[in-house]
C-alpha cells in the first residue's frame, strides 16, 4: 500500500487493476514516481518483475498549460508478460524532442512528425507488422533487461539507461555535423511555415476583411500583441 502523503502509486494501481488480461494503459506521471523508494518502490518492483511495464518516455518541460515541469509517460501492457518482451522495458528520452508554439516562448508541443518518430520507435520495439528492425539509439532510446533494471534499483528513469548523445563523442565528420544542423533548421523552417498557414487560416475565418494569406507571423512580439488584442476584444469587452 502506498504512503498516504503521495497518491501517484494509488493512481498507477487504479490504471493497472482496470485492465483485462489483454489491456493496455498510458498516462502522465510525475518524474519522482520513477525512482521513489519505500512502499512505492516495492509496488514498482512488483510491476516490473511481473512484466506489465512496457514503455517509459521522458518528456521535457513546458508541454502542458498547467504544468511547467518535466513529466514521464508510462505505458502498461498486460499482454507483454506472455511475449518475449516480458523481461524488457523500452526507455525513450524525448526531452529533446519538441517544437515551440508560435507566439508563446514558454510553451512547446509535439508535431505530427515528432509523434510519429516516437511511435515508430515503440512499434519497432514491439515488432509490429510493417516496422523496421528495432535498434537502440544512444541519447534517444534503449531496451533494458530485467537484470539491468534490477542493478539500477528498479528505477524507471529513462536517463538511467538511454545515456546522452553528443556528436563530438561519436566522432562524426564535419560534413555530417553540418547535415545534422541543416536537417534541424529545415525541420524548424517547415514547422514555422505550417504554423504560419494555420494562423493565417484561422484569422481569415474570423477576420475575413483582411488579407492574412500574405502575412508572415514570424515575430513572437507581434503575435503576442495580436493575441492579447483579440483576447481583450472578445473576453474583456465582449464585442
Image: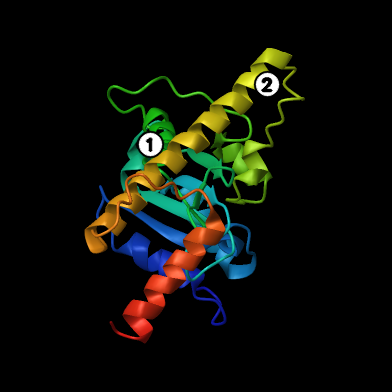
The one nearer the camera, 52 or 7, is 7
Left or right: residue 96 versus residue 133 is: right
How does the figure colour the protein chain or chains? rainbow
Left or right: residue 171 versus residue 91 is: right
Q: x and y percent of residue 139 in the render?
A: 63, 35
Label 1 sits on residue: 116
Q: Which residue shows up at 45% across the image and 72% down it?
A: 228
Q: Which residue shows up at 54% across the image and 44% down it?
A: 94
Residue 71 visible in rendering: no
State the SS at label 1.
helix
Q: Which residue shows up at 67% across the image and 46% down it?
A: 152
Q: x and y percent of residue 15 in the render?
A: 35, 63
Q: Note whether 166 is above or below 74 in the view shown.
A: above
Residue farthest to the bottom, as pictured: 237
Alpha-carbon neighbours of circle 1 within 10 Å: few (<14), some, or many (≥20)? few
Q: Note whether 196 is above or below 177 in the view shown.
A: below
Give the quarter of the image for residue 55. Answer: top left
Q: Which residue shows up at 31% across the image and 43% down it?
A: 79
The one nearer the camera, 80 or 234, is 234
The one nearer the camera, 145 or 117, is 117
Q: Which of pointers 2 and 1 lies earlier in the amino acid sequence?
A: 1
Label 2 sits on residue: 177
The one nearer the camera, 76 or 107, is 107
Residue 186 visible in rendering: yes
Q: x and y percent of residue 177 in the render?
A: 68, 21
Tell me whether the residue at label 2 lies in contact with that at label 1, contact meaning CB atoms closer than 8 angstroms: no
State the SS at label 2.
helix
Give the quarter of the image for residue 158. Answer: top right
Amino acid at each position: 500500500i502506498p504512503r498516504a502523503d503521495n497518491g501517484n502509486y494509488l493512481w498507477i494501481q487504479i490504471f493497472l487493476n482496470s485492465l483485462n488480461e489483454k489491456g493496455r494503459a498510458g498516462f502522465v506521471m510525475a518524474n519522482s514516481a520513477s525512482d521513489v523508494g519505500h512502499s512505492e518502490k516495492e509496488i514498482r518492483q512488483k510491476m516490473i518483475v511481473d512484466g506489465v511495464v512496457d514503455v517509459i518516455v521522458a518528456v521535457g518541460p513546458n508541454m502542458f498549460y498547467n504544468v511547467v515541469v518535466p513529466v514521464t509517460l508510462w505505458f502498461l501492457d498486460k499482454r507483454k508478460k506472455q511475449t518475449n518482451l516480458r523481461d524488457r522495458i523500452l526507455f525513450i528520452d524525448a526531452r529533446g524532442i519538441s517544437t515551440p508554439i508560435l507566439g508563446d516562448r514558454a510553451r512547446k508541443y509535439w508535431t505530427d512528425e515528432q509523434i510519429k518518430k516516437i511511435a515508430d520507435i515503440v512499434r519497432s520495439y514491439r515488432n509490429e507488422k510493417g516496422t523496421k528492425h528495432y535498434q537502440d539509439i544512444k541519447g534517444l532510446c534503449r531496451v533494458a533487461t530485467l537484470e539491468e533494471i534490477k542493478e539500477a534499483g528498479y528505477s524507471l528513469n529513462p536517463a538511467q539507461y538511454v545515456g546522452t548523445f553528443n556528436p563530438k563523442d561519436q566522432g562524426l565528420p564535419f560534413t555530417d555535423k553540418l547535415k545534422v544542423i541543416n536537417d534541424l533548421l529545415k525541420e524548424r523552417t517547415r514547422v514555422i511555415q505550417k504554423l504560419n498557414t494555420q494562423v493565417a487560416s484561422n484569422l481569415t475565418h474570423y477576420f475575413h476583411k483582411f488579407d492574412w494569406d500574405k502575412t508572415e507571423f514570424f515575430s513572437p512580439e507581434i503575435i503576442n500583441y495580436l493575441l492579447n488584442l483579440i483576447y481583450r476584444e472578445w473576453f474583456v469587452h465582449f464585442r
